[in-house]
Image (cartoon, rainbow, N blue to C red):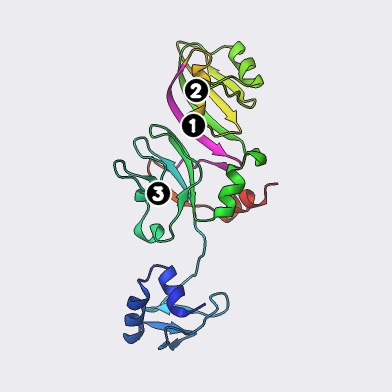
Amino acid sequence: MRLDKLLSNMGYGSRKEVKQLLKQKAVTVDGAYAKDAALHVDPDKQEVSVFGERVNYTEFVYFMMNKPPGVISATEDLRDETVIELLEPLHQHFQPFPVGRLDKDTEGLLLITNDGILAHNLLSPKKHVPKVYYAQIEGIVTEEDCEKFAQGVELDDGYVTKPGELIILKSAQQSEIELTIQEGKFHQVKRMFEAVGKRVTYLKRLSMGSLKLDDSLALGEYRELTAEELACLQNRD
């Protein structure tokens, strides 16, 4: 890979700005000052440094975010703040995108990456990736509702969902539940409860496949996936 491309990809500026770094003798390759922007380097075998700080080349980034309400799951929007805008500029440079969507008012686990293959594998209906939600429901959730969800419910547009596992945590006028589904239809959780005459008042995603929300993340915070978390996502069948 060309030296200027590597540094540009890692957020050190445009190729023109990288050339300025070379003129300032700010860049070294294996301890020697680099002069040629077109120099080919192997980031796996050679040590590239800028102002004495080693450049750890990364092609893909993987972030877990605790999505706050009021922010949309998109890369850009003319009206609303997006989850990408919550990332540091260096991380935005990698042009990541949210894997799937959480509604604007929904909180919880959101995976953000620039790895298109992983995103496809997690979102493809053929992969049957389970997603677990916690919700507060206006109305008494019953065992009959659990049975209906287990069979699949008909939504307002006539679509019948795949079976979902509904667990009642608290049955009252304001019920609390956990729901596991393998689809991601538009407003699906809310529409499933509307189909049985109830309304979701609060919704939070807890997990997606093997990836579970880190409880230490405050709303709007994010972190990189651990090597173990990433391996589990990549190795699922």
Which x, y percent locates residue 119? 56, 49
Which x, y percent locates residue 235? 67, 51
Amino acid type of the residue that numbered disc 1 sits on in the rendered structure: Phe
Q: Is residue 170 magenta?
A: no
Main structural element of the magenta stretch: helix, strand or loop?
A: strand
Q: Which residue position holds label 2?
A: 191
Which x, y percent locates residue 207? 55, 38
Q: Which residue position holds label 3?
A: 75
Range shown magenta: 199-216
Numbered disc 1: secondary structure: loop
Please report contact status of discs 3 and 2: CB closer than 8 Å, yes or no.
no
Residues under labels 1 and 3: Cα distance? Answer: 18 Å
Using the image, tell me which numbered label, if any, was put on residue 167: none
Amino acid type of the residue that numbered disc 3 sits on in the rendered structure: Thr
Q: Earlier in the sequence, mark 1 or mark 2?
A: 1
Residue drawn at x 41%, y 40% as measured from the top left: 67
Amino acid type of the residue that numbered disc 2 sits on in the rendered structure: Arg
The residue at the far left in this view is 79
Q: Which of 45 and 74 is in front in this view?
A: 74
Numbered disc 3: secondary structure: loop
Which x, y percent locates residue 84? 38, 50
Assess disc 1: are there few (<14), some (14-19) or many (≥20) residues with their C-alpha within 10 Å of its C-alpha: few
Numbered disc 2: secondary structure: helix
Q: Which residue position holds label 1?
A: 186
Q: Which of 220 and 184 is in front in this view?
A: 184
Residues under labels 3 and 2: Cα distance? Answer: 25 Å
Task: Count numbered badges in the picture.
Answer: 3
Assess disc 3: are there few (<14), some (14-19) or many (≥20) residues with their C-alpha within 10 Å of its C-alpha: some
Q: Does the magenta stretch include residue 204?
A: yes
